[in-house]
Image: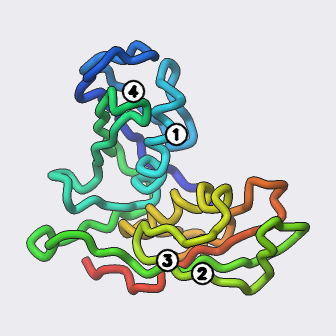
Amino acid sequence: MQIKFPRIKVTVKNVYEECHHGLKKGDSFIFEDFTKTPAGFCEGATSALFPCLYALSFGACFPFEENQRSIHTTCPDGGKVDFFSEVIEEGDIKPCFVDKEKHTGPNPKKMVISVDEVKGKCFYNYKQGDSFEVEGLRTIEGFCGAAYHTLFPVLFALNFGGTYPFEENINSLSTVTCPDGGNIRFKVTRADKKEEQ
């Protein structure tokens, strides 16, 4: 299934200290989709923004923002720069708008990470069928950091209502692969029913 992802505009809202990349207040960059970093944009900032860009791309909404299809983030290098990311053109995945009158604060979702496939040695000895429960954005004690780093954008998206329409269960993604040789493939599923809009 070929999916058209939304176009996202990232604007520099504030610069508190000199930015090593030379970003200035008001600079803006267009991500044609979340996989294409625009020329001249800081890769360090991209690493911090990626979970947000990914979540917006898969329909997530942030009810604490005035525009639910946007989010504020901060540079990982000492908080020198504030960014504002917003969808400027929707793609194929329907966003999950939340009724702001009913939104009273954080609503962490229950998600399950399961080991779907093992192709080789895993330092953490994960086995096919192993599963781990996550609530919201909480980490799992003792879980492999490299694997969690890869899983985090998916957890972030699912926690804020993202969906995967190309999967049998749209509230699940079955293709998250361990960065260490691809020996483990995980499936992440939002166990809580998606909020009715």
Question: Disc 1 and disc 2: Cα gap in Å?
Answer: 25 Å
What residue is pinned by disc 2? 132
Position above or below: 184 against 31 = below
Residue 132: % across, % down = 60, 81
Report the residue at 37% width, 61% height from top: 60
Position above or below: 30 against 140 = above
Instruction: Give the quarter of the image for residue 35.
Output: top right
Question: Disc 4 and disc 3: Cα gap in Å?
Answer: 33 Å
| 127 sits left or right of 152 in the view | right
The one nearer the camera, 94 or 137, is: 137
Residue 169: % across, % down = 56, 81
| 79 sits left or right of 92 in the view | left
Between disc 4 and disc 2, whose residue precedes? Answer: 4
What residue is pinned by disc 1? 47
What residue is pinned by disc 3? 134
Residue 83: % across, % down = 31, 34
Q: Is disc 1 placed on a helix, strand or loop? A: helix
Q: Is disc 3 placed on a helix, strand or loop? A: strand
Task: Determine which of the numbered discs, if any, sits on residue 29 in the image.
Answer: 4
Report the residue at 59% width, 62% height from top: 151
Asked if the residues shown at circle 4 and circle 3 are in contact, with their CB atoms under 8 angstroms apart, the answer is no
Question: Disc 3 and disc 1: Cα gap in Å?
Answer: 22 Å
Foreground mark, 1 or 2, reads 2
The one nearer the camera, 41 or 127, is: 127
Image quarter of the N terminus: bottom right
Instruction: Give the quarter of the image for residue 186.
Output: bottom right
